[in-house]
Amino acid sequence: MIDPIETMHSDRMKSLVEFTSSSLSTDYPSPFGASIYDAEGTLIAQAYDTVMREGDPTCHGEINAVRKAVKKVGSQSLKGCTLYSTCEPCSMCMSTSIWAEIETVVFGATVNEDASQYWEQPLDITASEIANRMLGDKCTVVPKVERALAQQLFKDWKAAIDA
């Protein structure tokens, strides 16, 4: 039997990978993208990493998407929302998701197994470990959704910056 939640996560991740790949034709390509859907399933924010363009190390895709989402909803709380990321959120992005009260975080590629092949920034604590250490309401982490597509996005990004 097909799980409708898995299908929804898969479809949304495919859409995010397609959106994020649009950055590859810019002056500042990035394989890191994020989208946020509200509890009703409406896409409320989508962004990719702008660290290099902005010269700001906090401009990760997830942070940019959270900034857009809280402005759109007019509240710092994104309770009931789901964040999708092409790559496992780093500690900063996962903590931001928790502080914004995001209910679920879904990611494609992993940091230690996938992204670190392109530059050395392995994590010593995973997104799931951060979520599990929080007191009170827990943020659910769903890993490796459409991982192969996210991995291909990294390969395409590498080809774009080497061109």
Image (tube, rainbow, N blue to C red):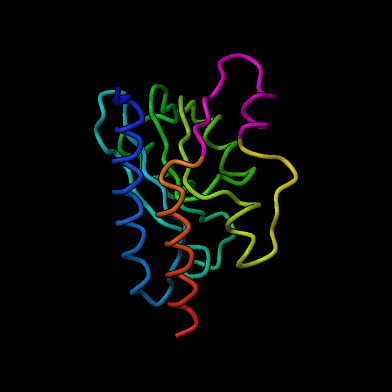
Q: Which of 30 and 18 is in front in this view?
A: 18
Q: In this view, which residue lies farthest toward the top?
A: 136
Q: Nearer the viewer, residue 73 or 34?
A: 34
Does the magenta segment cover residue 71? no
Q: Where is residue 78 in the image (x, y as percent from the top left)?
A: 41, 28
Range of residues picked out in magenta: 128-143
The residue positioned 61% from the left and 28% from the top of the image is 131
The residue positioned 63% from the left and 64% from the top of the image is 117
Q: In this view, which residue lies farthest toward the bottom?
A: 163
The quarter in which the C terminus is drawn is: bottom left
The image shows residue 103, relative to residue 114, as above or below, that is: above
Looking at the image, how many numbered discs can be counted on the residues? 0
Q: Position of residue 138 (x, y in %)?
A: 56, 20
Q: Position of residue 94 (x, y in %)?
A: 58, 38
To which quarter of the image does residue 92 belong? top right
Q: Is residue 13 shown left or right of residue 125?
A: left
The image shows residue 154, relative to residue 106, as above or below, that is: below
To which quarter of the image does residue 24 belong? bottom left
The quarter in which the N terminus is drawn is: top left
Q: Which of 120 and 55 is in front in this view?
A: 120
The residue positioned 52% from the left and 63% from the top of the image is 51
Q: Is residue 124 shown left or right of residue 96?
A: right
Q: Is residue 88 shown left or right of residue 16?
A: right
Q: Position of residue 62 (x, y in %)?
A: 47, 46
Q: In this view, which residue lies farthest toward the right?
A: 124
Q: Nearer the viewer, residue 81 or 71?
A: 81
